[in-house]
Image (cartoon, rainbow, N blue to C red):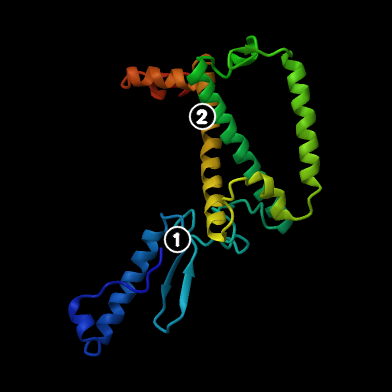
């Protein structure tokens, strides 16, 4: 969001030299209002100062608070949230940034797999390990322990190769064959994709936490079945009506 000034009344714009105190007062009132409104947009706000300079205000997770100096908004989806000061050390901050992106990707894959499997097969994610493994209706000729062992070895190899990368950016965003459609050809497009990835990944991590809690509260029921029961009777099938979902209710 970018703005240079607030819109003044016609008499101020037509005769600016006659009312300089009133124009200054109008500008000083409009600027904080625009800054507060921009706090919920998730973007950085720039506006022109009275001396011609440009001031940049970082969006903060808690409006009115001061973000730490090391969270300057340069990272994607950085809203100055670090109440425990875990990212004071640059090495820790880089490691947390990398770990968040990886967890975001796994959470998005996991939630998509949980919901997609239940929608297309009717099998919940808690039932899948206990039944015969099939792929599109074709039986898998390998037992589940063998599949898990192969996946473990494959992931260990991939993570070893990724860990050997010395460039901290390429450790997270390797590009090349991992971008076959060339979505990251432009810098603006790359930055937008980074923000979208983290925003959706954070939502997916919360969604997976909700799926786990829902399964515990509903006798290992899948999220799709739970949603269907809620939509069928939205006033009586809720979290508040489940004693396991709301303890001591």
Does residue 213 appear anywhere in the picture? no
The first of marks 2 and 1 along the sequence is 1
- Quarter of the picture containing the C terminus is top left
Q: Is residue 192 above or below residue 122?
A: below
Foreground mark, 2 or 1, reads 2
Image position of 189 (left or right of 18):
right
The residue lying furthest to the left in this view is: 11
Residue holding disc 1: 64
Residue 222, position as x, y percentages in the image: 50, 19
Does residue 230 appear anywhere in the picture? yes
Image position of 37 (left or right of 154):
left
Residue holding disc 2: 210
Residue that appears at 18% across and 81% down: 11
Residue 189, position as x, y percentages in the image: 53, 55
Residue that appears at 66% across and 54% down: 87
Q: Nearer the viewer, residue 44 or 137?
A: 137
For label 2, the crowd category at 10 Å Cα-Cα, with few meaning under 14, some 14 to 19 and many 20 or more, is: few
Q: For marks 2 and 1, give the CA distance.
A: 30 Å
């Amino acid at each position: 969001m970018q703005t240079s000034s607030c819109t003044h009344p016609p008499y101020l714009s037509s005769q600016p030299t006659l009312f300089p105190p009133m124009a200054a007062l109008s500008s000083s009132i409009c600027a904080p209002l625009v800054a507060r409104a921009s706090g919920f947009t998730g973007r950085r706000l720039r506006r022109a100062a009275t001396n011609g300079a440009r001031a940049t205000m970082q969006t903060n997770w808690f409006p009115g608070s001061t973000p730490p100096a090391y969270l300057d908004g340069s990272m994607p989806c950085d809203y100055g949230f670090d109440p425990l000061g875990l990212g004071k050390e640059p090495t820790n901050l880089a490691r947390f940034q990398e770990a968040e992106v990886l967890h975001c990707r796994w959470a998005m894959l996991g939630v998509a797999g949980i919901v997609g499997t239940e929608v297309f097969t009717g099998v919940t994610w808690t039932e899948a390990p206990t039944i015969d493994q099939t792929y599109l209706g074709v039986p898998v000729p390998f037992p589940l322990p063998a599949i898990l062992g192969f996946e473990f070895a494959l992931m260990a190899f991939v993570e070893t190769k990724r860990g050997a990368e010395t460039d901290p950016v390429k450790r997270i965003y390797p590009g090349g064959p991992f971008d076959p459609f060339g979505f990251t050809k432009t810098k603006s497009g790359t930055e937008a994709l980074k923000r979208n990835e983290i925003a959706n990944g954070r939502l997916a991590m919360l969604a997976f936490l909700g799926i786990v809690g829902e399964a515990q509260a509903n006798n290992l029921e899948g999220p799709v079945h739970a949603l269907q029961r809620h939509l069928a009777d939205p006033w009586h099938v809720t979290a508040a009506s489940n004693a396991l979902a709301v303890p001591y209710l």
